[in-house]
Amino acid sequence: MYVPKINQIDDPAALLAYMRAYSFAVLATSGPGGLMATHLPFVVEEEGGGITLRAHMAKANAQWRDFAAGEDALVIFMQPHAYVSPRHYDSRQNVPTWNYVAVHAYGRPLLIEERAAKIALQQTLIRQYDPAYLEQMAELPDSYLDARLAAIVSFSLAVTRIEARYKLSQDKNPAERERIAREFEASGDSVAAETARLMRAHK
């Protein structure tokens, strides 16, 4: 990813928090069939000073077969974002652009095949997105759970490299940045408002 120095961020804690906040991401791989991408909810965990991503996909999705080659995969986290009008700049000689945050995490996906580990991953995902469902899940018969588990492929990815771009008008003067942030906040668009929050946090 092209990352100008002004948009770089190297704070591990901030990147971990970002990936957890925007954990619905894109897994991209390259295999015999060419490039493939799948949109998945991830569990983002800190382990041994590093970051591990865990997720699952439908077994009918052939992408998981790319894992056997042992090549790096790419997980793309990208939210929020918002259009920036040149109306906000002091000079009229400006063009439109886009503010956004994107994090690219690289690593080799490994299959999770033990039943207990697959169940634990599903419980963690549910705890993350719908904790009230855990009680209902506990009542499901083993035969039903096993049938569902047989229809998915679970995997983990230890992150070996991260690229992050926080493109948040850092190259503009404080008055211009404030005008842009205020417009985002007043837009009624929650994604734009979140972009404004990140603008204020990463000056």
Image (tube, grey):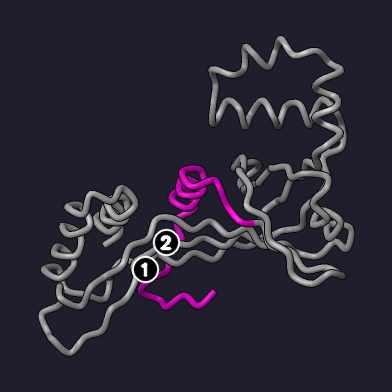
What residue do we see at 26% from left, 76% from top? 171
145 sits to left or right of 48: right
Q: Does residue 156 appear left or right of residue 198 in this picture?
A: right
User: Label for residue 167?
Assistant: 1
Circle 2 residue:
101
Give the residue type that dot 2 points to. Answer: Val
Sort mark 2 into few (<14), some (14-19) or many (20+) by Cα contacts within 10 Å. Answer: many
- Secondary structure beneath dot 2 equals strand
Residue 161, by quadrant, is bottom right
Q: Could you tell me which residue is drawn at 33 percent across and 62 percent down?
A: 82
Residue 73 pos. (x, y %):
72, 62
Find the magenta span and give its range: 1-26
| In-front residue for pair 134/114 | 134
Q: Nearer the viewer, residue 156 or 142?
A: 142
Say what amino acid the circle numbered 1 marks.
Lys
Is 6 within the magenta? yes
| Residue 118 belongs to magenta span | no
